[in-house]
Image (cartoon, rainbow, N blue to C red):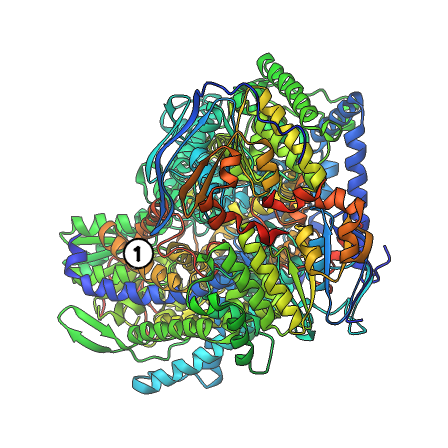
Amino acid sequence: MNDSTNTNPLTRMRGGYTSFSDSIHDRWATAPRWARWVVYLLLIVLAIALPADGIGSFMSPYTDWPTLLFFPIGGYILLAIGLNVVVGQAGMLDLGYVAFFAIGGYGMAVFGTKYGWSFWEILVVGVLLSALSGILLGAPTLRLRGDYLAIVTLGFGEIVRKTANNWNYIGGPNGIGGIPHPPTLTEWTIPDNGLFDAIGIGGVQPFKYGALDGKPYYYLMLVLIILAIVFVKRLEASRVGRAWASIREDEDAAELMGVPTFKFKLAAFAIGAAIGGAGGVMYASQAVSIIPTNFPFILSATILAAVVLGGSGNLPGVILGAFLVAWIPERIRGLQEYRVLVFGAVLVILMIFRPEGLLPSRRRKAELAEGEGGMGSMGAEVGGPVTVGAGEGVE
Amino acid sequence: MSETAAVPAEKKAGVPTLELRGITMRFGGVVAINDLNLTINEGEIFALIGPNGAGKTTVFNVVTGVYQPTEGQVVFQDSRIDGKKRFQVTKRGVARTFQNVRLFHNMSAMENVLVGADAHHRTGLAGAALGLPWHRREERDGRAKARELMEFVGIGHRMEETAKNLPYGDQRRLEIARALATDPKLLLLDEPAAGMNPTEKEELQGLIKRIRDTGRTVLLIEHDMSLIMGISDRIAVLDFGQKIAEGLPAEIQNNQRVIEAYLGVPADAS
Amino acid sequence: MNNLFSQFWPYTIDGLSLGAIYALVALGYTMVYGVLRLINFAHSEIFMIGTFAALGTLHLIGMPANVGGFALVGLVLLLAVAGGVASGGSAVILEYVAYRPLRRRGASRLAALISAIGASLFLQQLFARLVIPKAFGLPKEKGALPVQGHFAHKSDVIHIGSFELSNDKLIVIVGAVLMMIALDMFVNRTKLGRGIRATAQDPETAVLMGVNIDRIVTATFALGGAMAGVAAALYMLRFEETRFDVGFLLGIKAFTAAVLGGIGNLRGALVGGIVLGLIEMYGAAVFGSQWQDVVAFSVLVLVLMFRPTGLLGESLQQARA
Amino acid sequence: MRSRLIKVVGVVAASATLALGASACGGKSKSGGGDTVTIGFMGDLTGENSGLVIPPKQGAQLAIDQYNATNPKVKITLKTYDSQGKGEQAVPLAKQAITKDKIAALIGPTFSGESAQADPVLEEGKVPNISSSATNAALATHGWKFWHRVIGNDNVQGTGIGEFISNSLKAKKVFVINDSSEYGKPLAETVKATVTKGGAQTSEDAIDVQASDYGATVNKVKAFAPDAIFFGGYYAQGGKLIKQLREGGVKARFLSGDGSLDKGLAQGAGGTNADGSVIGCPCLIDPSGTASAASKKFAVDYKAKFNADPAIYSAEGYDAATAYIEAIKAGNTTPEKINDYLSTIDKPGVSKEIKFSSTGEPTATDVYVYQVKGDQLPLLGNAKNATVK
Amino acid sequence: MLLEIKDIHVHYGKIAALKGVSVEVDEGEIVTLIGANGAGKTTTLKTISGLRPLTRGQILFGGKDISKVPGHKRVLMGIGQSPEGRGIFPGMTVVENLSMGAYARRDEADKDLAEVYELFPRLAERKNQAGGTMSGGEQQMLAIGRALMTKPKVLLLDEPSMGLAPKLIQQIFEIITEINRRGTTVLLVEQNAQQALQVAHRAYVLETGKVVKSAEASALLDDPQVRAAYLGGGAEAAAGPGD
């Protein structure tokens, strides 16, 4: 391109990053099946080795790394995968996602402490319960247009939290304590030999769920995350995913092409809710005690930030986003009271730097670049000659 | 005018496919359609013409369930479809295109058509998530059907392209292919020739006829008189929400009311 | 329920004065939404800045005490100017830093929303950690606590049976209504106002009319911010204290009010604010204060179910034909 | 034991330097065997409630510095963990403290909510912990062996204040308000139950911590026309509540619990609105040292070191640290041994007798009442026998 | 030369919408751009009025390079446009819509308003009606009238006949001729090539973002290629409903 407006270093950096991520995209798209499986396998091995002390001392010098990996990191990732179904796939803005996390958490707490059910039973029930609550919330409200839905979901999140706070049966503001851990499956210990030590998991009891060791929880979360990914990925490539995409792009046209949009939106909401609920069950059983203030609005906002920051609609992006959003504030613990300040600034800067997210999917990138994609662009945007819009032409 | 535009020899005995019975549509105080009766027979190409704002697109919206008529009934193949949801109407066999192309712009052409084909698929969440054989068969069949339809409308060579990157004429065709994928018995085309050059219009004319020849009924809105006159079996003219004329093309062309309200004095045109 | 009947007037007046503040803050959301289709999440912090500007002004003039009567009206006027300027100014800066670059890149509203959330966190923390401790000479850890400035002498202006109207509530209600009328006239009668409406309805055509969109956006943020600043001054009169996160809940409520009335609709903001204020008070009277938010949000959901675009519908941009 | 305290008078100034030296080498030596034992302090050190956490931290720091200044064989390092008062942050910090930092004991977590989440970790990690300010009664019901506190729980406090309202104030109509928090609500409920038992008529309402306008609550209070109002909650809301109550024309006496024991209450209420309000606390704040000689000495030392009067929970922080110091002095340096020692300790502290019941609760049940005067909160006395002028 | 467009390139994302379009418009002319949908006609107009950024090329207006001048300033310089789809402000009355046309001007616009009312008596009748509730033809008149209120040296008209009944199309083209006769230069983009070529002096044919032909309008009317591609196979088809 000959235009001279784009020679500033920031734009060039941005361009460089874009072409880099695009080339990875392309490689991946054309990679043979076996190569992909090798990558998947490597990723899983990496994930298994992740809680190792060696990694932890760098990643998290101030606080317990395996626990961080379980929550917030793993928890945020799971929640972001769930919210991504709602926001990224179906294009509905949900500002009250934390409600489902709370419902899962309280489900675990109530069934675990009052009825003595085991974690595994509650996991199933909690997921169903959250999905049901998603349907109950969604049924009357999903007809609302984007921003109205946003405020209604926000309100729902607040209603759930306040109700929990005012309902004595579930402990009111005291919440519920003494929530059981998952029953230990086996005391089996990973042998302390060279190979396992090398990846830092020698001597771990991966199926023994206590209060102190965060690793077994992390592995449990990992399994859940992988299941969620497979589930969501398969939906994405099916009729369901196509229906979501069509709804996001033009809901009316979709409906007129025979897509029962309401049903699919509701399904997206329910799936998002179910995944959020699973996260809640996991969290509560690890935390032993939950109180309503564990489920504030800011958590909804944070998960949404994770989804958008990573690249709404694209799973690897969303996972990356969730990881960063969960990890950065912990890593910069050294900044003490300034870390939220820095975190806020980082959010703004990252969005300015890359409004389409760090790893957007191709399609979503196009949508977001043009301000379509479910929520549309800001109103008063008119490309003018003084804008950097010209740069878009050649990236 | 093209030579192929002859009126089909055997006129169907007139089995009605779509009937509008006393349709009135009011928005607030504005009457968009007033007591409209219309019968469209199986296998016909039926055109709806009239000045802008006459209520033509509103008719489409009433038929496809976008609006519920204030009064009257919409009967499709002997059962009422007013009051049905839009996707249910589509499943019954009514599909449409739009005045301004409304594709899913960022999806590929193939995916656009697949969305249409999905209208009759049954895969639910579980089927898709578990990759059940049923689901895989549907996907395969859907793709085959989509491929076939894209060949049929003449964009077989652009199946994997993103919809918005297609030339405008191809986007119009893709929209038709997407509508056909829902397997309609009645196809509603809203100004399909808008924005096409004469060559493209001629091809479109052929395409509409071929669609009719596959046994479907076509209802279209169009401003291009040569196209209308070339392919329509019957024409109805709307003005201010009322039907002011209905008949064979030749009758319409010479109808005094139609000329006054819509066509204008012929002398002006040249 | 008994409470509501025996104390009907106090609840109503409290609801009105609370609703008036909601309404003023809601204007900022609604104007920015009308023009940019953006939920300006950081608007709550714009309000917060207004409260601190008012408080800072009180400190500057030596923290008067027990001001009553017309002197109080004058003082509130001064605070409103200070709050309006500070909030309006910071809203403009906010737009310039956090939204304009995104706008230039044609980014999605979702991205802008996240930027807004980031800006909101940043501003809150900036005040809690740096500005408040510095400005009021507090130890660092006290920045997160409420800061007070007592200046008003509050007394009842009207007292008939259970109908008691105190001077501060009267000023709040009257002040808010006056501001709303002024803004409504501004938007409907002036050239800049016409530019704002045109941009809201069709930005591209507005450019073709010679409207400078950037200037309109700046004006929108300045006006919306100024309204929040005035609301902040009235808030300070009512409650005489503020803190770094004072805007959080109030902002959510104001946004709710904007949606309730019909977002993008200036008069809707007034209606939504007043209705929300009253619902909260009546709801608290009937179900207990701890349920007032639940009642408010439930009513919102109910209203939207039957009127999907709010009580008055959207009007700043109208349905795009 | 008073003699030990007297011995360290005068070395306060030197202690800070020594503490620094201790912490420098503290990281290297393992607790248990080496010269240094690390004790953790966990709580909201930078968040909005840090005003309630920094005083006990300083109290603990004072005790440890004084101890280290005596040049003992085993020195103590205090390591702080900023949980921001949030359970989800306290849990990984607690694990880090146990597995990486190998702390021998912990003071904190300071709040009840975070305690409920972090204490099970400490329990399994077998690290003794003493909270200086987590007063939620339910914490003692889990059968934790390593958990302790040096402050009376909310039932103790609520009963104490409730009896004060019934016996000393002789209030017949009491309006009880809580802030819907895990602290305020149970406290308010206990007070309500106690005054009801004392024959008073009650009504109640709850406020939202983040709300600004308590008009609805004020109107309810007005309708009820009580003799006394009890508020279970923190001073930030308490001050605002007093202000709005007074503006609404409610003149009844205002009472509250330890969460409101801060001069912020009077500041928030504005002018003289809060004057005469009575605040109860199972804690002792005694800057003028009228309660006891130990208390007086503590006040002097504290002022000398931090250039501030002892504030809320300062004495409790000091006492919690003292408990550990005693254990270490007795030669216990491993977590479990320290914990064993705690079950036997019985030693007068600054705020109360340092002695734990089998559940980890302090055996002393003293509740003190303070009365707002200007923005000061002079000690009125023990709730059992104090009277209001 | 009043308006000179030199080899402009415009991109939407990665897609090139214009790949080197050059157009010249002289004072007093009616110049028309014809071509199929998607050929780049509308983009050309939008680029001239500054709604789309250039990636390459130059736009000269009155000899001055305006490529970097923001859109709202170009209006003041004398480039007025009636946009595709009319762009009526639906919530504003007819008068308000018209006064939006004079938004950027600092001089009195009463005279121009009177002139617009004279050209479009229909608008005068409907002064206080909301723009959104008017019929298509009326909206088109309003859009043109509003563009005239900017007092343009060159008036850009984007598909003024779109969606109008054949009867109304006649009327609109008559008004365009009249506007030009009164001294305003017109750059007209039309789908309806037949009509456009009849009123225009010169014309450019656009295909997929490029100018493929330019000539006197009357010459193009007789050009066999143009006839085949844009005017239909035979004269009778082009003559519209008369056949």
Residue under numbered circle 1: C280
Q: Quadrant of residue D330?
A: top right
Residue C284 seen in the current view = yes
Q: Is residue A180 above or below residue E169?
A: above
Nearer to us in this view, C47 or A197: C47
Q: Is residue B138 above or below residue A100?
A: above
Question: What residue type is disc 1 on?
Answer: Glu
Residue D51 as seen in the image, left or right of residue E42: left
**Residue E226 spot, x, y in % from top left:** 77, 47
Q: Is residue C253 above or below residue A280?
A: below
Residue C102 as seen in the image, left or right of residue E165: right
**Residue B228 spot, x, y in % from top left:** 57, 37
**Residue at 72% across / 38% down in the picture?**
B199
**Residue B232 spot, x, y in % from top left:** 55, 32
**Residue at 27% across / 53% down in the picture?**
C283
Nearer to us in this view, C139 or C121: C121
Q: Which residue appears farthest toward the top when viewing the image?
A: B133
Residue A219 seen in the current view = no
Counting other residues with Cα less than 10 Å from the Cα at mark 1, is it few (<14), some (14-19), or many (20 or more)? Answer: many
